[in-house]
Amino acid sequence: MPRSRIVSTLSAPLRSWLDRKRGHPSTPAAPEVDPLLGVGQLLRRQREERALSLRQLASETRISTPVLEALERGWRDRLPEAAYLRTMLPLLEHHLALPPGSLEPALPRKPTDPESDWGSRRPSLLARFTPGSIEVFTTWQGTVLYAVVTAGLIYGINLQQQRLAAANQLTLRPVSPLPISAPDSRSDASGELLKAYPDLRPLQQAEQGVAMQRLREREARNTLPAGVLRLQLLSPSRVSLSSETGERSELEGVSGELVLQMQPPIRLQLEPAPSGPAVFWDGQPVSPQAGQRGRFRIPAAPAASSPPAPAAPRP
């Protein structure tokens, strides 16, 4: 039997294996054309018929220019995710008056084999688990990490609340309201406060003239009448002057007449002590202190007390 007839009676897999063994290459399959290229040509043709640029189309449809360019040029790796792309395609179909569903081939195709789908998705899902981009409910690693972080945050919040309560910085029990039958003690508290601090009612005090009376009393205490001190020294003497207002003077070898205007009370000491009248206050001679010939004291004049002003009638 010829060899060709023997080979023809064999099964198809065995014949292809024999052909490869004999060096006959199998015919390569035609490369599959991406439907996105056809969608891009259709999209560009409709856009150019309406004399629209990519920028104008992007402004009218609210779709970014890079996405439109990727659709027209067939750049699938630069397209957004399928969920976003599914909402963009109907907008383009409606704006360019295309039949509904004519741009759907641009969407990524779903695999039909479940096993191949799992085999193709598993590496991509694992590749998504990175510190910068974590798919929480898509991969089990992200789900576990999300659960651990949530539990840690809840535990930390509870621990912080317990520490605040232990330090009396947090009230766990709400403040109970007062019963309706409880007396209102706000008026009593206000009365007690005004009794302790009457200055909290300035208008009432102004009506009674309290402020004016206190001002006049302070002016009467601070404003003391000034007088003229005159010294007549026949021989060089040492003069020591001091007053309660802080004035102090020390003079050496003073002789003749010395006239000063000062406020009492005044303390004066002359060395050596004069033999006759030498100190005069407002023209009146001042006698030395008892037992101390050279020491003189001029007391403060009593301030005239002014009667309080009558309170103005309240309108």
Image: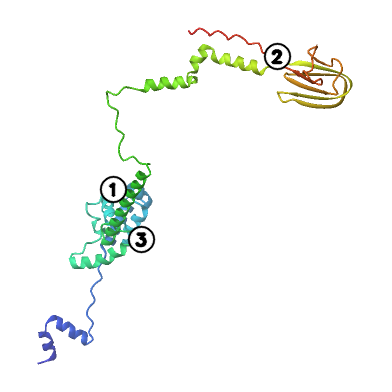
Image x and y of residue 315, in percent: 48, 7
Q: So how many labels did they put on this image?
A: 3
Quickly name the residue at label 1.
95
The alpha-carbon separation of the residues under discs 2 and 1 comes to 106 Å
Residue drawn 34% across the image and 62% down it: 130
Q: Secondary structure at mark 3?
A: loop
Task: Residue type at mark 2: give it.
Answer: Ala
Q: Secondary structure at mark 1?
A: helix
In the picture, measured across the screen, residue 182 lies left or right of residue 293, that is left
Image x and y of residue 196, in percent: 46, 21
Quickly name the residue at label 2.
301
In the picture, measured across the screen, residue 124 lies left or right of residue 11, that is right
In the picture, measured across the screen, residue 228 lies left or right of residue 140, that is right
The alpha-carbon separation of the residues under discs 3 and 2 comes to 92 Å
Compared with 302, 243 (above or below) is: below
Quickly name the residue at label 3.
131
The crowding category of the residue bearing disc 1, from other C-alpha atoms within 10 Å (few below 14, some 14 to 19, many at least 20), is: few
Image x and y of residue 286, in percent: 79, 14
Image x and y of residue 222, in percent: 66, 19
Task: Residue type at mark 3: give it.
Answer: Pro
Residue drawn 13% across the image and 87% down it: 7
Quarter of the rendering containing residue 260 = top right
In the picture, measured across the screen, residue 27 lies left or right of residue 220, that is left
Who is closer to the viewer here, 83 or 272?
A: 272
Query: Tag 2 or tag 3, which sits nearer the N-term?
Result: 3
Dot 2 and dot 1 residues touching (CB under 8 Å) = no
- Split into 4 quadrants, where in the image is the N terminus? bottom left
Examine the rendering and report whether any part of residue 220 can be seen: yes
The crowding category of the residue bearing disc 2, from other C-alpha atoms within 10 Å (few below 14, some 14 to 19, many at least 20), is: few
